[in-house]
Image (cartoon, grey):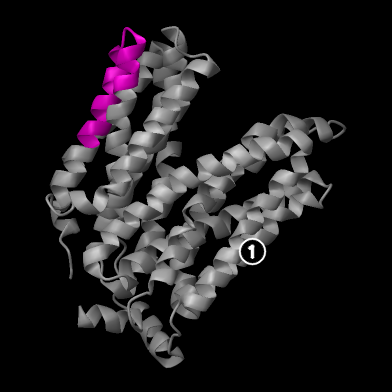
């Protein structure tokens, strides 16, 4: 433990600093989801632009590619200027680029701001996890990782309710929500312990040598990323085919899944008292795959609900566990860079899964694509078991 404290460059974080990191959880969901309800209004406002439809959708789809770039760059930058400093810079730019569209009336400038938002959003999320896994005492960090995921799930639901209210008056007001990053940054700046510049420079010099890219951890992250989000692309088509795809039918299913996932993430610290790293992976992946299979074979609404409950439990365990396990298997000095690589492949997982599943959808239908997602879960179990030595904790 003493060596980890030295690597962290100071004492473990105070309660206020932990709460500041936890409050960052909803920022990623806000960046990715807040525009959904107002996309038609933005398109109508810029109707005179012949490329309005494409550019407006790019404000959402381009975020994923930008987040991959931000995840890759954040670790290297953190080693040079410090994790806290880069986090504060990222949060400031997050608020600035997110709220810029309130004043901008140029669609190309708005797209550019959204791309930059994606970069700093990903960087801030990775740095928050790096700080949680490095500077919170080992006996409580799993609990705080669970809280971080729960705050992201619950917080974005609350913020999306505000989005609906603001959009009723003017779609531009929605962009002001991104300014919530600034008070979080101020809280972090006031509660984080000061860092010794010389110690940080020495740590950066050491981190620059002897580092190996964590290919096995990245491959597992890619599979879990594919499992965690690809279902949202294909499940609605399958549910429509069995008469359960109307918006009023989908909303309760998504709410139940999110509620169960939040509960599982909240209990993650407790679960880790009884299960080691690999068993949690296996249980989470099997639950996720089983839930998707139940939905695929469901003949009535009760089975669909059961599938979402099972799937949510698996997803809620896997989200904090992936980053906890990867961080525990990496020396504290290299965690920012490792988490950057892992988060980048996590974001890239859905893109690769779509390349594989699109031909399945077009040839065999939506149900076959859903079964294909479950198959990815079973493959992930085999991969985790084969790579189990990569997850041996270093502490």
291 part of magenta stretch: yes
Quarter-of-image position of residue 282:
top left
Q: Is residue 27 above or below residue 338?
A: above
Name the residue nearer the viewer: 145 or 331. Answer: 145
In what element is the residue under mark 1? helix
Name the residue nearer the viewer: 5 or 226. Answer: 5
Residue 138 seen anywhere in this rendered image of the structure? yes
- Residue matched to label 1: 93
Quarter-of-image position of residue 306:
top left
Residue at image location 39% in from the left, 19% down from the top: 360
Residue at image location 36% in from the left, 14% down from the top: 367
Q: Quadrant of the C terminus?
A: bottom left
Q: Is residue 222 above or below residue 378?
A: below
Report the side of 309 relative to 41 (left or right): left
Name the main secondary structure of what is drawn in magenta. Answer: helix
Q: Position of residue 366 (x, y in %)?
A: 41, 15
Count of picture labels: 1
Q: Position of residue 254 (x, y in %)?
A: 44, 28
Q: Position of residue 348 (x, y in %)?
A: 43, 44
Residue at image location 70% in from the left, 52% down from the top: 176
């Amino acid at each position: 433990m003493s060596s980890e404290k030295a690597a962290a460059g100071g004492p473990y974080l105070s309660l206020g600093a932990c709460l500041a990191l936890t409050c960052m959880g909803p920022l990623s969901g806000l960046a990715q989801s807040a525009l959904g309800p107002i996309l038609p209004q933005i398109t109508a406002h810029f109707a005179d632009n012949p490329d309005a439809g494409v550019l407006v959708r790019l404000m959402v789809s381009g975020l994923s590619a930008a987040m991959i770039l931000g995840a890759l760059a954040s670790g290297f930058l953190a080693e040079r200027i410090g994790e806290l400093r880069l986090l504060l810079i990222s949060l400031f730019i997050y608020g600035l680029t997110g709220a810029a569209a309130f004043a901008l009336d140029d669609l190309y400038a708005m797209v550019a701001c959204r791309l930059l938002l994606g970069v700093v959003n990903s960087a801030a999320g990775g740095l928050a996890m790096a700080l949680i896994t490095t500077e919170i005492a080992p006996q409580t960090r799993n609990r705080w990782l669970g809280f971080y995921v729960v705050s992201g799930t619950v917080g974005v639901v609350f913020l999306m309710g505000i989005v609906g209210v603001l959009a009723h008056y003017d779609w531009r007001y929605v962009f002001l929500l991104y300014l919530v990053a600034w008070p979080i940054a101020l809280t972090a700046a006031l509660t984080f312990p000061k860092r010794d510049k010389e110690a940080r420079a020495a740590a950066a010099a050491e981190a620059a040598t002897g580092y190996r890219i964590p290919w096995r951890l990245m491959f597992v992250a890619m599979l879990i990323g594919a499992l965690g989000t690809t279902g949202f692309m294909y499940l609605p088509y399958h549910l429509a085919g069995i008469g359960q795809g109307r918006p009023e039918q989908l909303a309760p299913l998504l709410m139940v899944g999110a509620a169960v996932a939040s509960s599982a993430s909240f209990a993650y610290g407790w679960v880790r008292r009884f299960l080691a790293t690999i068993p949690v992976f296996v249980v989470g992946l099997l639950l996720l795959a089983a839930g998707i299979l139940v939905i695929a074979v469901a003949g009535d609404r009760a089975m669909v609900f059961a599938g979402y409950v099972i799937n949510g439990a698996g997803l809620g365990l896997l989200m904090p566990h992936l980053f906890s396990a990867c961080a525990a298997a990496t020396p504290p000095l290299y965690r920012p860079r490792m988490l950057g690589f892992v988060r980048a492949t996590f974001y890239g997982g859905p893109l690769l899964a779509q390349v594989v599943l699109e031909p399945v959808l077009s040839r065999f239908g939506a149900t076959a694509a859903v079964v294909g997602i479950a198959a990815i879960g079973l493959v992930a179990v085999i991969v985790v078991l084969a790579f189990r030595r990569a997850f041996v904790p270093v502490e």
